[in-house]
Amino acid sequence: MFTSDTVARIQNMVSNLTGFHYEGDVLTAKADGLRVSGDKNHVFIGAQSIPALARGFMRLFMELSNGKETVELFEESCFDTVGCQLDCSRNAVMKVESVKKYMDACCALGMNCILLYLEDTYEVPEYPYFGYLRGKYTQAELKEMDDYAASLGMELIISMQTLAHLEQFLQWPKVAHMRDNATCLLIDEEETYEFIEAEIRALRACLRTNRLHIGMDEAHGVGMGRYYDKHGPTNRFELLARHVRRVCEICEKYGFKPMMWSDMFFRLGSKTNEYYDKEADIPQSVIDSLPNVDMCYWDYYHTDEELYDHMLKEHARMGQNTIFAGGVWTWSGFLPQVDYTWATMEPGLRMCAKHKVKTVFATMWGDDGNETSHFLALNQVALFSEFCWRGDSCTREEIEATGEFITGLARQAYNTFALFYPGAVDERPGKKLVYCDLLYPLGPKKEDIQAALDRSRKAYMLLAPYYDRPDCHYARDLFAVVGMKAQILVELRDRYLAGDKAYLAKIANETIPLLVLAYGKLHASHKELWERDYKRTGWEVMALRYSAVIGRLVDVQDALKRYVSGELATLEELDEPVMDTQRWRAMKQYSLLVSPMYEI
């Protein structure tokens, strides 16, 4: 049985979240799955857990708010654990109260797990440079979040790193001796394992769960840096397996059952270092040498069920429990990539249900600055909860309606965010237009600029009815900047080459000042969202980027004026021919969009 205090607290939480208040009598009981039977006067909710109870209230409130007279439903969870992972390592460390708000929403969806991705953003007392100047969580903060998760019947899991993705820590001279390369720890060194034990010991002091994500993904070049200098060539499969065993021993010492990203085994078995290479060959001897560690298969990219099916079969061959990490796309710049999330996660979750995967979670990464607030994508987290509770026959209409009810953000507004992108592909013209230079051809191609301009104009109008919401206010300011920038770039180079100084004078004297004002508005609305949800530490990255874009616009304005007046004989940047500017690294990061310099 649920206590009366628990029922009242959960009902109140869901009411505050959704704005729907139920005045009828409530009877609850422990039961398999979720059963809801009632009307506006009386309701019975049978639920297997507190998150299922919260979902029962959410489904009741949602149906009644849609005009239903009676509600009768039965749902069963097809995953034992369904959750959401919040990246708190790419500048944006979510405030404790914000994490609690996210827990509330996930609990109301019936999700029973929250993961925090923390590379170095948590306190390890023995290592003061760990998370230095990065807004790291104190042990008291982690304990507070763990307590709150427990009060909701949810599990708080930390997704840490014990091999790679530690460049923020390893940059400091005091710990450089633990570095294999810029991102990876030096394997087989006792001090490395003393550090890893300190990490794990610090988390053990804060968490109830016995599960810990030990990372180990994308350890590119492991064994090829200082390790190679010290030991020479080595079997990298054996090196990785040896490290995994050692880390798992530490986990066991502190009562943790570890899980890890699986990609490095597949990459080392691939002739092209590809995770999703169907020809990858992992030696049976390596598989046999693995300790008891769950393998976490991450995939946010594929739109066909066949590839997910293949990868899940290959993971089953490894003999470990398979966990699936999908993605709600928050890392493509400024707004969630709505269409690509739909295109990739529907087949992925369908195959997880087919293969009877027990644990799935939605990752929400913040690559290259965490430009997109996690709250902007909360609508689509419902994709995971609805696949879990309604099964793989749930419709997009049902998922969108649930996301809308949980967040209060109309699906029309949320789907308008998708216009920042050209469709269900990983292309990022919107981000490029925010950052790219007016004079260098480093942004989108001309035809893509025109398409982005058309989408921005449409989005600006569609968001008008929702402008009073801070998230839609921000999105509309964003589309204003993209549209204005695109309009200039469509014409500027051609008009310059045609000698149209009247046009250039207008751009310098009228258009650029308006664009600078638009960037100022975007900066302000973006900062408002950030300071609402995240710690201040980390915002300096975005502040510097906005300042750089605005400063360069003023500089270009000056150059245009001097060219029009005859002080400058030419604009050297625009005299250069337009060539293919795609570099060996995909043009998706800020540093590659603002200058032809390799790094700035």
Image (spheres, rainbow, N blue to C red):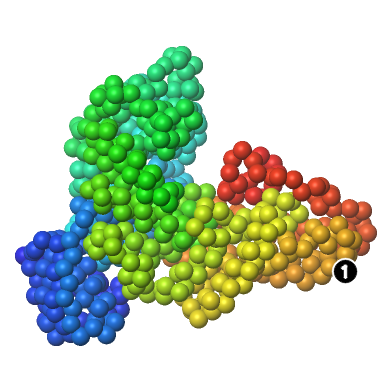
The structure residue drawn at horizontal position 37% and vertical position 23%, both measured from the top left corner, is 237
**Residue that label 1 marks:** 502
Q: Is residue 332 visible?
A: yes
Viewer-closest of 27 and 171:
27
* Residue extending farthest front: 306
The structure residue drawn at horizontal position 60% and vertical position 69%, both measured from the top left corner, is 456
**Percent x, y of residue 89:** 43, 47
Residue type, label 1: Ala
Left/right placement of residue 439 relative to residue 227 reads right
Left/right placement of residue 262 relative to residue 426 reads left
Viewer-closest of 484 and 180:
484
Give the quadrant of residue 213. Answer: top left
Q: Is residue 563 above or below residue 266?
A: below
Question: In what quadrant of the picture does the C terminus appear?
Answer: top right
**Percent x, y of residue 380:** 38, 63
Q: Considering the numbered disc 1 on the image, is that residue within a helix, a strand or a loop?
A: helix
Q: Is residue 504 above or below residue 317?
A: below
